[in-house]
Image (tube, grey):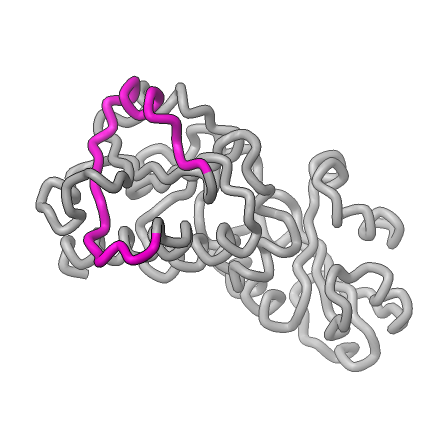
Amino acid sequence: MKLDDIRKLHQKKYRQSLGHFLVEGEHLVLELEKAAKANPHWQQAQLFVTGAYQDWPSPWPRHLISDRQMAHLADTKTPQGILAVAPLPAAASGASAGVGKAVYLHEVRDPGNLGTILRTLAWFGGFRCLLSPDSVDPYNPKVVRSSMGAIFHIPVETEVSLDTLASRFPHIACLDIGGEAITSPDFQSHDCYLFGNEARGVPTEVLTRLSAHRFTIPGARAVESLNLASAVNMVVYELNRGLGR
């Protein structure tokens, strides 16, 4: 891939048209190498390094570039001097069906929130992530960095409409202030856990149409709501605690 094309990977439309995304920094490259040992898909990456990393023992084709070229390619202001260009996974629409419980995010917009959520799902294992249309691209460089490499280990489906959930998941749960406590035994029995947009949540009429069972995270409620990533963290922890993991 040409260097000018790599620079274009900062934008979603070029990630989609070129079929690749950026993996920047030593830690993320190491995580990608780890993932490649288990998944042949990630073995198709290419590595770009400056002189400081020219002896990096990479399993992929390695390209030595200048510090100036690295600064041009990188998304960060002070690049470490190592990045990989990895192929986007094949569209996963429905492909991950049956792989653990599903966490559905409706119009999540903050890259840091999504990256943190993916990191949580990877830590506990046994989950997949579904993203609605108008959500942040999971292969956005900021999401990839904040996921700390979890993006390589979690099945992710994009462009999943809310209207398709009822046909895929017999039992859907969502968070709601007036719902049943997540410590209830019933909380464990759902297939899909639905979370709304950071500011607007999910429209009430949609939750009713989906027959979503409403649950809440008990608290003092001194503030109006929890951060989205924090709410997902607590829910996933509770699900794993209930399974005795």
The foreground one among 148 and 48 is 148
Q: Position of residue 59 (x, y in %)?
A: 65, 65
Q: Is residue 56 left or right of residue 89?
A: right
Residue 207 within the magenta-colored segment of the rendering: yes
Tell me the quarter of the image containing the C terminus.
Answer: bottom left
Q: Residue furthest front?
A: 222
In-image side of 217 versus 7 (left or right): left
Q: Residue at x 81, y 46 (%)?
A: 8
Q: Magenta span covers which residues? A: 200-223
**Image location (x, y in percent) of residue 213:** 20, 31
Q: Nearer the viewer, residue 136 or 189?
A: 136
Residue 81 lies in quadrant = bottom right
Residue 171 part of the magenta segment: no
Q: Is residue 130 visible to us here?
A: no
Q: Is residue 135 left or right of residue 194?
A: right
Residue 242 lies, in percent from the top left, at 14, 54
- The percent coordinates of residue 77 (x first, y second) are 77, 68
For residue 211, above or below residue 237: above
Residue 97 in view in this figure: yes
Q: Residue at x 59, y 56 (%)?
A: 144
Q: Residue at x 53, y 64 (%)?
A: 148
Above or below residue 167? Residue 89 is below
Report the side of 28 relative to 126 (left or right).
right
Which residue sits furthest left?
Answer: 185
